Each structure stands twice: as structure tokens, then as C-alpha cells.
Image (cartoon, rainbow, N blue to C red):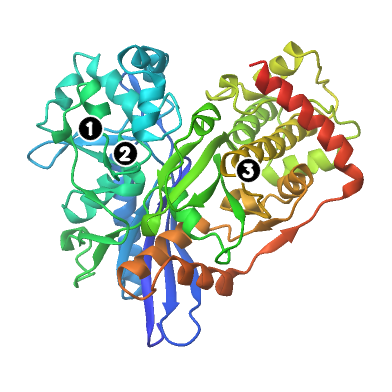
Amino acid sequence: MAENTRCYLGFDFGASSGRAILGYLNTEGKKILKLEEIYRFPNEATPQGKHLAWETDRLFEEMKTALNIAADMGVHIDSIGIDTWGVDFGFVDKSGRLAYYPVSYRDDRTNGLMDEAFKTMSKEEIFKYTGLAFMQFNTLYQLIAMQRDPEESKYLNGDYTLLFMPDLFAYYLTGKMGTEYTIASTSQLINPVKRTWADEVLDAFGINKKIFAPLEQPGTVRGLLRRELCPRLDYDIPVIAVASHDTASAMAAVPAVKNESFAYISSGTWSLIGVETLKPVCTPKVMQSNFTNEGGINGTTRMLKNVMGLWIIQECRKQFNAEREQAGLEKLSFADIVNEVENAEALTGEIIDVDDNLFFAPDGMVDRICAYVKRHGGEIGEKDRVGKVADIVYRSLALKYRWALGCIEDITGQHIDTLYIVGGGGKNELLNRYTAQAIQRPVKIGAGEGTVIGNLLMQAIGLKDVEDLWELRQIVRDSFGDKAYSWDEKDNARWDADYDKLHKLIENA
């Protein structure tokens, strides 16, 4: 490794895989970040007992494997950071043992609990104190589900400590407990104005505040790597609480320029579309549109909307390939599916609301899309079926982005000039083209590895190698650039008509 170069190790956990990536940053002259993926491993919630849960023990072992790979490479690691999805958590007992294993947000234990919760505290009151969108899997409703379970309610008595997923992984690495703010802000238990726990909500639902570890802001050193995890890394390595909610890290890595009017999409299993604000926006319009206020770095707020993202096409591919396997055909890659769209002779022109609850659960996604289309008077024939279904998903996603962007402009009173897309979904050229055409303004694609880039450069801020958020974004622009997509005005009328279809679906839901 060259002199005057820092090396940061980022663990990036998504809902389908985890990765360990090294980031090399020269600290003199023009700062350029270079990435090297050293390990990738699967991550999938599996049935465990009565729940759909994460394979936490195996994930811990995967982290240890990555540390040993780094040791084999002979690199000097200056720090480690972890980012994951939001809301999910485990409980650690007083002896330091993981006593309650994290349940997946896709488990059905929270079905119907939001309406039950509103009998205790109204929707308006919950939003007043938390500013968070109402999703049935939010931590609040998961804790209410535990309260109602005689076997699980004991974990809420104050003798156990709740750790969100990145904090749990950091505890495994360091033995130190803490609650990083951006991940806590996904729980519907944080007051975004005070940036503390929402005591009114905790009290209303009888949630013991003693279950939480202390809140820490992004950039805080959580502790040092335990030497026994990898004895060959025989020096002090700080583990930094980065912006550990993956969307917060991705937002940090948007290559925008200061004072630019922009929105962003962190595109992956979910599409999270939003803007960065200096303070939370907790107006009735925000609640009615089911937008959310989540924590960012440097005291910022991410006002955003969760849109059901590439999860739908991932599930479609799973069903297509199960059918093809039965027929003795080769499996389709995502690129193959895009080719099927491009080569289809007659696309349907049908639209779905990707956020309909019908599309939340796994398995049988193609059948559910066909049923939805039929229920609304359409039909998907067998000819070019793969291309037709995929086209419906991609166009509907792009149109839902347009709807969300319109909500943002209505809420903030500001025109959005540019939409940035970061994350793995930015590699999908068809969706990028559709998005530019749907929103009829420039779309710029940031780094596909935006989440882990934000993780790595937040470590750099924690070590004082980078000054602040705007220097971080300058490094992203210098290191990775961006690619722009425009739109064809001749197609505006067709996309406007499709948008009207989506609007009616949303209004009639």
C-alpha cells in the first residue's frame, strides 16, 4: 500500500447478500477513493422456529472470514465500519450473550398491528413525536408483537439490551454496545427534532427505555476490534459507528454539488427516494403521503419515501427460473430479463402500483402481478410473458418515482432539477431510461457502490481524514463521476397517460 494512503474496511449488509470491501484513500493531494471487494456472502432470512429470521451466527462467521482474508492480504486496516438495512434488532443478555435472535421485517408477526397500535396512540400523535412513515414492520410494531407473546415479552423487562443490526455486528467485533443514530431513526421510536428517544411513544406503549444502549452520532468510535477474532491483525483497529443505516450511507455518497436542488434514489431491493433537509419536516402533507424523516450525517434529516424497489423483479426472476428449471431450460439473469423486454413484440402498457400490499410477500410474484392486472381490466398473455411482466414492473417503478418526486416538490415548495440514483439499481440501464422519461428531467447515476462508499468515507470523517459531508461528496465525484440520462419529448404524452393510470390506482387503493 502506498505511503499516505488510508485503508478502511466496510461491511455492507443488504437483504440478499453481504460484502466486505476495502477502500483506499490517498490523504495528500487530490483525494481519490479506490475500492476492492475482498469477500461476498449470501444473506437471506430463513424460517427459524416460529419466525422468519436472520442467520446471525453464520453472518458473524462470515465477518471473521473477511477479517482473515484481509490479514492474508497483508494490508494495514485503519478502521472498520458496518451498514445494514433498518428496523431489525436482537437482544443481548447481561452476560453479553445474544439471547434473542433478529427476526426479519418480512415476518408476518406485525400483520394488523398498526391498526391495533392506533387504539393506544393515534396515528397523528405517533407521527407528531416521530415524523416517521407508517410501515407495518417498523421496530415499534415488532416490539408490540413481542409484548403480546408470552415467550418473548421477558426480553422487554430491562434486563436485556436491544441492538439494531449494525450495532449488533459492531458489538460482535468490539464487545462494546451503542445505538447509532441513523439506524435508530428507522424505528418509529426517535424524536427527529430532539434527536433523542420519543419518550411519549415509549410511555404510551409501555416500552422500557432501559432496553436501549446510548445513542451515538455517525463518526463515533464504538470500540477496538477484538484481537481474538483475527490474531494476525495484532494492532488496534477502531470500529466506527458510520451512518449505519444503508440509505444514510448511500445518501452521503450522492455526488451532488452544494446548493444544487436535487433528489436521490437509493436503488436496490427497496427504492428510497428523498431529499436532504436541515431539519425534519413533520407536516400533515408528509404524513398523508407516508413520507418519513430519518437521520443523516452532520445533523441533517433524510425526508424520503420507501418505494417497493427491485424486490419485485427479484421475486419475478425467482418464479421465472423455477418454471424454467421444471421445463429443463437455462435460468435467466437480470440482464436476460431486460433483453426480454427489449425484444418483446407487443408490450401490454399495463401499470401496477408497486407499493400495493399484494407485492410485499415473497413467492408467486408473477402470478400476483397477473392477478392485479386482471383485476383492473387488463390481461398478460403467454407470448413474451417474461418481457411483458418485467416491462410492467420497470415502467411502474419509474412512474412511482415520478409520483414521489411530485410529493417532494409539493411538500417542500421547491422544484427538483436533478435526480441522482445511487446503489446497485443504478446499473439497470432500462430502468434508468424509463425513469428519465417518466420524470422528464435529468437523471444522473452515481456510484453503484454508493452505500459502501458512504460507509468508507464516513470512517474517513471519523478519523479526521475528511472534513465533512461536502468534501466527502467531492471525493465521490472525483473518484467515480456520474452518467447522465435524458428523455425524448416525443414520448411525453404516452408517459403522461401512463402516469394518469398510476394516479387512479393510488387514489382508488
Inter-mark Cα distance, 1 to 3: 32 Å
- Quick check: marks 1 and 2 in contact, CB under 8 Å? yes
Whether residue 18 appears in this view of the structure is no
Can you identify the residue that label 3 sits on? 409
Quick check: 480 above or below 399? below
Q: Amino acid at mark 1?
A: Asp
- Mark 1 or mark 2: which comes first in sequence? 2
Quick check: 505 above or below 325? above
Q: Say whether residue 194 is left or right of residue 346.
A: left
Out of 233 and 373, give the one closest to the viewer.
373
Inter-mark Cα distance, 3 to 2: 24 Å
Q: Amino acid at mark 2?
A: Asn
Number of other residues with Cα within 10 Å of mark 3, as a class: few under 14, some 14 to 19, many 20 or more: some
Out of 344 and 296, give the one closest to the viewer.
296
Q: What is the quadrant of the N terminus in the image?
A: bottom left
Whether residue 144 appears in this view of the structure is yes
- Quick check: marks 3 and 2 in contact, CB under 8 Å? no
Q: Amino acid at mark 3?
A: Glu
Q: In which image quadrant can residue 195 be found?
A: top left
- Mark 1 or mark 3: which comes first in sequence? 1
Can you identify the residue that label 1 sits on? 199
Inter-mark Cα distance, 1 to 2: 8 Å
